[in-house]
Image (cartoon, grey):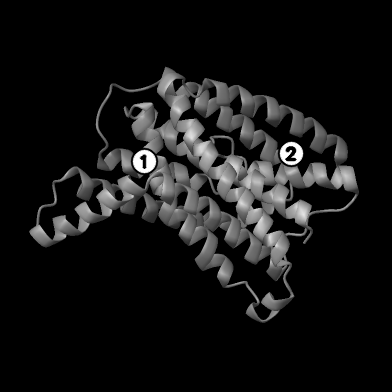
Amino acid sequence: MHTIQAAIMGAAQGISEFLPISSSAHIVFTSTIYKILTGTSFQNVGSEEIFFDILIHLSSLLAVIIFFFDDLKTLITGFFCGIKNKNYTTPEFQTCIFVIISTLITCIIAFFIKDIAHKLTETPAIVSILLLFTGAILFLSEKLKKPDKKMDYKTSIFIGIAQGLAVFPGLSRSGLTIATGIYNGLDRIKAARYSFILSVPIIILASMIYPLLELNIAEIQTFNFKAIAAGCIMSFVTGFLCIKFFMKFLEKFSLKGFAFYCWIIGTIMLIVSLNAA
């Protein structure tokens, strides 16, 4: 793995993981453009690439944990205090239950569709179409929004389903979960905060447990750690800045701007991928 490639992949991960524009789609598109410009493909199946993928996801996860540290601390403390005091009605305890429900539903759905989703990464045209669909969901979420309400079990289930379907490359995890929250009556900030907090357990599960089963530990000493470090730094820095930007953005604006972005990039990449086929 080359340092430039790792830095590009890390930046793509950090920028697109938390903005509602599909990190998986941008990884596929970045790989496609890289192949067109250099005549070679990104390597993504070896132990080094698996190890790198784990670390750049953990780097973006670190950005979430640092940015939402106070929220996470309050939720975890409230959860265990609720168990200790047998008080299961506090907002902190219920939010943790909602996160657990959403995560379990996501894991069930992802288990059954992950193999199909993985194969789609080899078909950029389909990924482009799914990104266009993400744009439609972002655009319609506030137009079709239900009356304002607090987070509840029903909404946590729907968000879990949305997150599970986002295993398909081109369907944005943050986009679908935030749009689902908004559609079900949450305001933009609450929907985004829940989506980011929800990303903590799912990134850990998706980026560590499953990939580690495929990792050849014996090959670690042969890895290019300079390149891996560059990718991790880019993933963390861009991820943190994107979270900060996005939360500020949602205070004033809707998701429509990102919908248009998805439509533009999806259309461009559909044309490029079809011509490159």
Q: Is 257 situated above or below 233?
A: above
| Amino acid, disc 1 | Tyr
Q: Position of residue 106 (x, y in %)?
A: 43, 52
Residue at 37% in and 30% down = 189
Give the residue at mark 2: 125
- Reading the chain from its start, which is encountered first: label 2 or label 1? 2
- The N terminus, quarter of image: bottom right
Residue at 49% in and 32% down = 246
Q: Secondary structure at mark 1?
A: helix
Q: Nearer the viewer, residue 87 or 122?
A: 87
Q: Which mark is residue 194?
A: 1
| Amino acid, disc 2 | Ala
Q: Position of residue 182 (x, y in %)?
A: 38, 28
Left or right position of 126 against 87: right
Q: Nearer the viewer, residue 41 or 236?
A: 236
Q: Position of residue 184 (x, y in %)?
A: 34, 30
Quarter of the view holding residue 211: bottom right
Q: Nearer the viewer, residue 263 or 84?
A: 84
Quarter of the view holding residue 270: top right
Q: Which mark is residue 46?
A: none
For the question of whether residue 121 can be seen, the reply is no
For the question of whether residue 216 can be seen, the reply is yes
Q: Which mark is in front, 2 or 1?
A: 1
Q: Residues within 10 Å of mark 1 (few under 14, many from 20)?
A: many
Q: Is 236 situated above or below 55?
A: above
Residue at 53% in and 57% down = 58
